[in-house]
């Protein structure tokens, strides 16, 4: 029980709070907006952990965030793309950039290239995952869209 | 109808949308729909991240064009939502031009903004809670909070001293974060230099630019996608460069 708490619950709470911190920076007002961004971030991080913290896991996490964003835009009846962008931020490979820099400075070419490619892979997986998921969701439920967006 | 006034109003709305960090297709579509609502048959809108061009042909066959240069901008989601809402209202109601123009011009002032103090808190809180995600403990969290505050203060209040060049600004903030992280760990507050530095750098990482670039690719705006991708890669190299410089400097102590 404690292991579950430490491995999954605590990181998700942290991702939630980090995303709420980002909503201050990107000027998101209102409890609902902050909540969507935070819950999206926590959901993404949970999927990422459950799927094994690989590049593919990042893809799945981004897809989950994309679908979550689409569902929320139906619930809230206006586009929530901004909040979804904030929810993706914890998954952005800041660590990859940092470690690539460390290897580069130390002159270790092979680990440097490995880390760099992995960072690019992560970034691409994130972006493609979120966009693909929301495009597929829109294609599957076009009728809901008309209800969700009053004048699309 | 006064088409010049209409054009000015539409261009201003496009400018505000672009300034708030909207996607290209949203800017082009919104302005087009707005001009349609005022009865123009074929308005032409062209937008790239730092320029909006709107061109209309009046019913008499007289073409008029307006161009707005958009300065370097960040993301302001509240302004984006207000622009969206206003655009929809204008399209639905098509009020008299003077009223529409006044409403558009009032947008930036009407939009609520977090005070710098709250934004500073955001800059501190976000890195603080990233530290546990990267495997840091309680003290790493505290150090990351302090580093984030320093970066935020540098971005919010240091604009006068470090200028408007975003590459230089990012590199400087990144160097500051790396240096401070190293000093805090040496002073015994933080435990891991790597964790604290990465957490602090997360507020500088161009996540927004990158995801936006990918959206433009999906929407088919290749030119804007390339320019945003270049933006993201430049910011990432600025972060790496700055962090390397900061750590080299920290190694001297």
Image (spheres, helix red, strand yellow):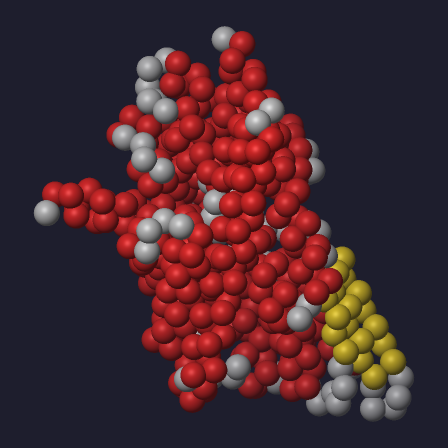
Residue at 54%, 56% in the rendered image: A124
Q: Nearer the viewer, residue B249 or B107?
A: B249
Residue farthest toward the front in the current orientation of the protein? A110
Q: Nearer the viewer, residue A104 or B136?
A: A104
Work out whether B23 lies above or below B118.
below
Name the spot of residue B195 as percent of width and height, x first: 39, 31
Residue at 66%, 37% in the rendered image: B167
Which quarter of the picture shows residue A146? bottom left
Which quarter of the picture shows residue B170? top right
Which quarter of the picture shows residue A11? top left
Name the spot of residue B56 as percent of width and height, x first: 80, 80
Q: Is residue B225 left or right of residue B240?
A: right
Name the spot of residue B86 as percent of width and height, x first: 55, 73
Q: Is residue B81 left or right of residue B62?
A: left
Residue A9 is at least partly visible in this image? yes
Q: Nearer the viewer, residue B220 or B59?
A: B220
Name the spot of residue B246 as percent of width and height, x first: 55, 22
């Amino acid at each position: 029980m404690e292991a579950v708490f430490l491995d999954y619950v605590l990181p998700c709470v942290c991702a939630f709070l980090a995303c709420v911190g980002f909503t201050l920076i990107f000027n998101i007002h209102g409890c609902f907006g902050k909540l969507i961004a935070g819950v999206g971030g926590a959901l993404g991080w949970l999927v990422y952990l459950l799927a094994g913290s690989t590049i593919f896991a990042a893809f799945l996490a981004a897809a989950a965030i994309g679908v979550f964003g689409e569902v929320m835009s139906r619930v809230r009846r206006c586009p929530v793309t901004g909040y979804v962008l904030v929810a993706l931020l914890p998954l952005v490979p800041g660590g990859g950039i940092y470690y690539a820099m460390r290897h580069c400075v130390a002159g270790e070419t092979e680990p440097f290239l490995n880390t760099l490619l992995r960072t690019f892979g992560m970034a691409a997986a994130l972006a493609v995952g979120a966009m693909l998921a929301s495009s597929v969701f829109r294609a599957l439920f076009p009728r809901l869209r008309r209800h969700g967006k009053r004048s699309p | 109808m006064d088409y010049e006034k209409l054009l000015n109003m539409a261009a201003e709305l496009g400018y505000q949308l672009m300034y708030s960090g909207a996607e290209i297709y949203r800017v082009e579509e919104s302005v087009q729909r707005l001009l349609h609502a005022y009865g123009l048959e074929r308005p032409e809108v062209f937008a790239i991240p730092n320029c909006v061009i709107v061109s209309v042909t009046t019913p008499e066959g007289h073409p008029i064009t307006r161009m707005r240069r958009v300065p370097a901008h960040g993301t302001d989601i509240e302004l984006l939502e207000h622009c969206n809402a206003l655009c929809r209202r204008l399209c639905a109601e098509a009020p008299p031009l003077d009223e529409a123009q006044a409403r558009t011009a009032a947008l930036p002032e009407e939009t609520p903004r977090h005070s710098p103090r709250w934004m500073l808190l955001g800059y501190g809180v976000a890195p603080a809670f990233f530290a546990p995600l990267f495997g840091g403990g309680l003290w790493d969290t505290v150090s990351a909070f302090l580093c984030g505050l320093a970066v935020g203060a540098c971005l919010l209040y240091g604009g006068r001293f470090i200028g408007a060049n975003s590459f230089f600004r990012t590199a400087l903030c990144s160097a500051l974060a790396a240096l401070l992280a190293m000093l805090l760990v040496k002073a015994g507050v933080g435990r891991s230099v790597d964790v604290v530095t990465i957490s602090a750098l997360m507020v500088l990482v161009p996540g927004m630019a990158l995801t936006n670039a990918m959206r433009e690719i999906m929407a088919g705006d290749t030119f804007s996608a390339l320019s945003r991708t270049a933006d993201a890669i430049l910011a990432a190299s600025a972060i790496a460069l700055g962090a390397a410089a900061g750590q080299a400097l920290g190694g001297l102590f």
